[in-house]
Image (cartoon, rainbow, N blue to C red):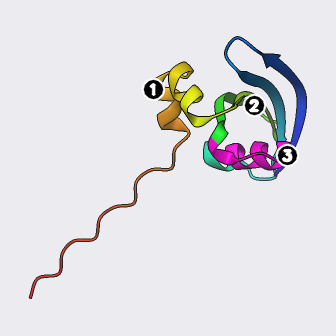
């Protein structure tokens, strides 16, 4: 998976950078959002916890997806601005609890 940053726009009012990116992937399906989030953070050389992928779409028949992500100055700022459903989409799912072993 190769990520290319197309544009960065500074939004001083919301204290974030709005990033447009392009993902070239080899797989037949679109990569998972968490992998794309990690890739965008690596491309920008920032902490992955401050990056929130709003959307990304693969065009039919192509191995290229385009998307939009927001990079915040702090996690508290992100929680104030981003809707709850976007935050949930960008957090790994909780690990299932192991059932207690019966004696």
Q: SS of the residue at dot 3?
A: helix
User: What residue is drawn where x is 75% and y is 28%?
Assistant: 67
Q: Which residues are magenta?
A: 36-49
Q: Residues within 10 Å of mark 1 (few under 14, many from 20)?
A: few
Q: Magenta-highlighted stretch: main secondary structure?
A: helix
Q: SS of the residue at dot 2?
A: loop
Does 57 sit above or below residue 81? below
Marker disc for residue 43: 3
Out of 30 and 18, give the one closest to the viewer. 18
| Residue sitting at the far left | 103
**Which picture quadrant has residue 16?**
top right
Asked whether the residues under the numbered discs 3 and 2 touch, taking CB atoms below 8 Å apart as contact, a structural biologist would say no
Residue 5 as seen in the image, left or right of residue 11: right
- Can residue 57 be seen here? The reply is yes
Marker disc for residue 60: 2
Q: SS of the residue at dot 1?
A: helix
Q: Position of residue 24 (x, y in %)?
A: 85, 43
The nearer-to-camera label among 2 and 1 is: 1
Does 87 sit above or below residue 93? above
Judging by the rendered image, the residue that carries numbered circle 1 is 84
Out of 20 and 41, give the one closest to the viewer. 41
**Which picture quadrant has residue 57?**
top right
The nearer-to-camera label among 3 and 2 is: 3
Magenta highlight on residue 3? no
Q: Position of residue 35 (x, y in %)?
A: 67, 50
Does 28 sit above or below residue 73? below
Magenta highlight on residue 48? yes
Asked whether the residues under the numbered discs 2 and 1 touch, taking CB atoms below 8 Å apart as contact, a structural biologist would say no
């Amino acid at each position: 998976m190769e990520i290319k940053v197309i544009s960065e726009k500074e939004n001083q009012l919301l204290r974030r950078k709005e990033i447009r990116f392009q993902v070239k992937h080899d797989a037949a399906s679109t990569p998972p959002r968490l992998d794309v989030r990690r890739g965008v953070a690596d491309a920008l050389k920032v902490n992955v916890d401050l990056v929130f992928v709003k959307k990304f779409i693969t065009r039919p028949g192509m191995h290229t997806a385009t998307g939009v992500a927001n990079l915040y100055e702090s996690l508290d700022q992100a929680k104030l601005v981003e809707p709850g459903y976007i935050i949930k989409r960008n957090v790994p799912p909780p690990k299932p609890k192991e059932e207690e072993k019966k004696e």
